[in-house]
Image (cartoon, rainbow, N blue to C red):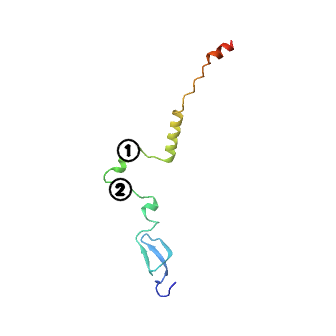
């Protein structure tokens, strides 16, 4: 690496507004965040979908809450209900019926 062209690299303690802290490295001496993975709604599971036009409700009404397990159950039911009927017994050929008597 060339000398004198790279910025200084500091070991800093990152601080979030929620109070979470951790050590990292940065070119800045102080590292403050407004939101982190500890308090962000996406990572905490508290995220809510904001829907002003009712698209999410319309989708869930039309398709319902779908899960992989539910889809597999439905596929199994379809397989069982769509099973082919038993094949009819083959009729004996005219020459075979005479030889049996």
Q: Secondary structure at mark 2?
A: loop
Q: Mark 1 Cα within 10 Å, few/some/many (few <14, many 20+)?
A: few
- Classify 46 as above or below 96: below
Q: Position of residue 59 (x, y in %)?
A: 38, 47
- Classify 7 as above or below 97: below
Q: Mark 2 Cα within 10 Å, few/some/many (few <14, many 20+)?
A: few
Residue pushed farthest front? 95
Residue bearing the label numbered 1: 61
Query: Is 6 situated left or right of 59 in this image?
Result: right
Q: Quadrant of residue 45?
A: bottom left
Residue bearing the label numbered 2: 50
Which dot marks residue 44? none
- Quarter of the image that includes the C terminus: top right
**What residue lies at 46% left-to-right and 61% top-to-bottom?**
44
Mark 1 or mark 2: name the one nearer the start of the chain.
2
**What residue lies at 43% left-to-right and 64% top-to-bottom?**
40
- Classify 29 as above or below 46: below
- Classify 58 as above or below 9: above
Residue pushed farthest top? 101
**What residue lies at 38% left-to-right and 55% top-to-bottom?**
49
Q: Quadrant of residue 51?
A: bottom left
Q: Secondary structure at mark 1?
A: helix
Q: Nearer the viewer, residue 38 or 93?
A: 93
Q: Nearer the viewer, residue 80 or 98?
A: 98
Q: Position of residue 92 (x, y in %)?
A: 62, 18
Q: CA distance from mark 1 to mark 2?
A: 17 Å
């Amino acid at each position: 690496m060339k000398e004198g062209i790279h910025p200084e690299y500091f070991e800093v303690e990152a601080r979030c507004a929620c109070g979470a802290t951790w050590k990292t490295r940065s070119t800045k001496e102080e590292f403050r965040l407004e939101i982190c993975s500890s308090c962000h709604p996406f990572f905490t599971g508290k995220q809510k979908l904001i829907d002003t036009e009712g698209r999410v409700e319309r989708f869930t009404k039309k398709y319902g809450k779908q899960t992989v397990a539910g889809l597999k159950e439905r596929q199994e039911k379809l397989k069982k209900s769509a099973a082919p009927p038993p094949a009819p017994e083959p009729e004996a050929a005219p020459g075979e019926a005479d030889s049996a008597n």
